[in-house]
Image: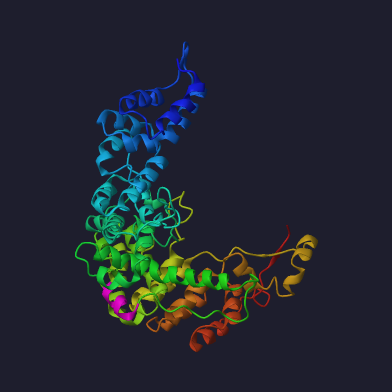
Amino acid sequence: MVNPRTYPLWRDLAMREDLPKEALKTVVEALCTPARRPYGFDSRTDRWREEALKAALPALLARTSAKRLRNRLLAQADEKTLSALAVEGTVSAADLPAVLRTRGAWAGLVCGLAQHPDQVEAAVALLPRLPSHEVERVVRDWDPGLSVRAGGTTPAPPLPQALFDAVLEACLTPLAAYLLLPHLEEGWEAVSVFSKDWSLELGSHQAWAMLARCPERWAELVAHPTLGTAVQHMLLDQAEIRAQEDARSRAADTDPAGEELPGAPPAPAPALSEDLLLACLPALCLPELAELPSPHLTARKTLHHIAHRVHNNPRLSDLAAAQLHAAADALVTRGQLLSLPQKQADDHGSDGHILPLAQDLALLSANPDHLAGACARLASLDQPAVVSPTPNPTLIRVFDSAGPDHDRPAKLLERHSEHRRVQALAALAANPHAPHAAVTDALHALHPAELAWIAENAEGPDWFLGAAAAVPAAEAEDDGLVNAVAR
């Protein structure tokens, strides 16, 4: 049993420069032996021992070369302490076997070792041992302001290029491997039909964080023999979205009052040049996913993913028109996306995919038959369920500032997201390949409130607006207004 009052003495003794070498073993044993009482382990006293050991550890490790004693000291240190000692050079690559014997690798250890040129290779070799979510953190945590060397304020050296390249490759490799052998992830079918991505999220956050740090290398990376395809997918999915987010963030930072400035903010410059977009075209239509099983599910998700890319990069509509049209045709045919499914009794969302499907075809397809089929599917959907409520004093007070047009049919539809069917039909009408007759037939199936929505928004080709205005109102309707019901 050790008297806790002696731990400060052992600490001071360990830090003395004139400590005899013969006494070193005794000091290490005293500071590394857990505190005990006659009845067992003494946690309170052991905390004092740990504090004394932590303070003395740099001095002890600097003087201890015997493997057994050194390993015992390393086993007692926590990750933060070991990272700091690696920065100082007290812990080196030669200590890795002892460190890894009792714990896994972590980002701080990699950063600490890599600050010494002769240990960069050993630091890179640790990357496969890191948990996947910590790999990118090696670069993120390389902050010169946080790395201070012993006895001074010397900042960390620049991040070694070899370490950056290794982290970049480690973050992109999972996606590259998935694309070589794609498979359905368990439970992905439950993802909402409105989800933009479904399988290519694998490693995307870390991979994009690394790509965003080296835009000057994108042209080189899209042609990489093993990682190029993954880079193409990442740039198509993320580059423009992140550029817009960064532009909004910068605009908010430059407004000291935190108020919205008058006028629309200038659009940010495209993140991808035309040459880069052309270099990414091989990945545009996700050819790796073309042969996945369950095409009635995977084809719809793939089509939606492609449409999302075109929405983010509108220049693709011209640069890759033929490729997009061919992909849309193949996916609709293989997945039988326009076939009427047999509705199951417990299938409450069987029609939920029609709206995004129609929007996607309006953007991607040049096939008149497929566009006509989308119009027919829209016409077959249920009518909007929104009705105008009986005037309520509470609601009148709440919405008094909204103006007298608050309960107009078109506004009611938008407020309850019931305008999406007519919005999809308007998008189909804007496609020059859509048969006018199919669109006009669908107009006759719309609710009068949906026709009012077309008139108020007044967007679309003239023939479409004229055809909507010419649809006769049903006798049961009062000028196309939605009927009121009692609460």
Q: Is residue 405 above or below residue 233?
A: below
Q: Is residue 242 visible?
A: yes
- How far from the left and from the top, in percent, is residue 448? 60, 74
Q: Observer-nearest residue: 154 or 134?
A: 154
User: Is 237 displayed left or right of 281 in the figure?
Assistant: right
Q: Quadrant of the C terminus?
A: bottom right
Q: Quadrant of residue 84?
A: top left
Q: Which residue is rendered at x = 73% and y = 59% of the image?
A: 486
Q: Main secondary structure of the magenta part?
A: helix
In the image, residue 275 lies in the stretch drawn in magenta: yes
- How far from the left and from the top, in percent, is residue 31? 41, 26
Which segment did they paint magenta? 273-281
Q: Which residue is rendered at x = 55% and y = 73% of the image?
A: 251
Q: Quadrant of the N terminus?
A: top left
The colour scheme is: rainbow
- How far from the left and from the top, in percent, is residue 235? 34, 68
User: How many numbered marks appear?
Assistant: 0
In the image, residue 412 lies in the stretch drawn in magenta: no
User: Is 164 displayed left or right of 467 in the figure?
Assistant: left
- How far from the left and from the top, in percent, is residue 263? 60, 82
Q: Quadrant of residue 222?
A: bottom left
Q: Quadrant of residue 453?
A: bottom right
Q: Residue extending furthest front?
A: 18
Q: Observer-nearest residue: 313 or 290?
A: 313
Q: Is residue 293 visible?
A: no
